[in-house]
Image (tube, helix red, strand yellow):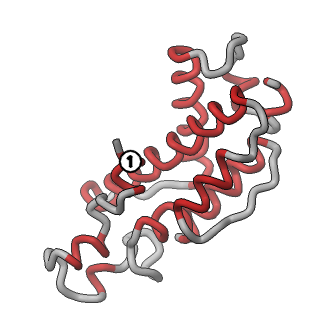
Amino acid sequence: MTTWRMMLNRLPTRDNLKKKRILTTEEESKCNECGMGEESSNHLFLLCPKIEEVWNEIQRWLGIPLAQPNHIERHYDMFINLGNKKKIRTLLLAIWVGTIWMRWKKRNEKCFEGKDWECKNLVLEIKIKLWCWNRIFKIVEEEIDLDSWCSNDIICKIF
C-alpha cells in the first residue's frame, strides 16, 4: 500500500501537505531527517543523505553495483531490472518494497514520536523483515538461516 501510494505521489509527504495548504511555510515542508531539502517522495526515499546511506548498504548486501537515479520510478525500474531471472527479480522487488516501507515507517516514528534512527539498524531491520517474508512467502525456495541471509553478497549465495 505504501509503495503504491508513493508511486502515485499520494503519500502525505510534507510537499503534498504544503500543496493542500495543511503546511504553509517553506520551513515546515523541509525534510525532518536532514533539514536540507523539501520532503517529497523522491527526497525521502532516494535523495536524503540518510536514505542514500541505506541504499548503499543494500547494494553491499546484494553484492550488485547500484546506480542512484534521482527519480523514484527510474530507481524502481533500475533496481528490479538488476536481475535477469524471475526468481532474482522477485527477490529484488521484495527488497525494494521492504526498504521503501521500512523507510516510511522510520519517517513516521521520527515525525510523530521523535525517534531517530541509524542506517545500520534500519538495514538490519530490513534484512530481518525480508527474511521473515521469505519464510512465509518462499521468495527464495531453499531454507536460509538468518545469519547467512544477513551476510553480504546474498544474491551470489542464493542463486
* 18 left or right, relative to 126: left
Residue found 68% across the figure and 13% down from its top: 141
How packed mark 1 is, by other alpha carbons closer than 10 Å (few <14, some 14-19, many 20 or more), is: few
- Taking the spot 47% from the left edge, 74% from the top edge, the residue there is 34
Q: Nearer the viewer, residue 93 or 49?
A: 93
Q: Residue furthest bottom?
A: 26
In this rendering, the answer to whether 28 lies above or below 129 is below
Tell me residue 150's x, y (percent): 70, 32
Q: Quadrant of residue 20?
A: bottom left
Residue 56: where, in percent of width, then height? 70, 57
Q: Secondary structure at mark 1?
A: helix
Q: Quadrant of the N terminus?
A: top left
Q: Which residue is mark 1?
A: 4
Q: Residue at x 36, y 58 (%)?
A: 8
Left or right: 72 with respect to 26? right
Residue 123 falls in which quadrant of the image?
top right
Depth check: give the residue in front, 134 or 105: 134
Instruction: Tell me if 111 is positioned left or right of 158 in this view.
Output: left
> Residue 19 location in percent, x, y?
22, 78
How many numbered callouts?
Answer: 1
Residue most extreme to the right: 156
Q: Of the residues shown, which amino acid type is indicated by label 1? A: Trp
Residue at horizontal 56 percent and vertical 30 percent from the top = 130
Quarter of the C terminus within the rendering = top right
Q: Is residue 148 above or below residue 21?
A: above
Can you give x and y, in whole percent of width and height, for residue 134 in the image?
58, 21
- Left or right for 148, reference 126: right
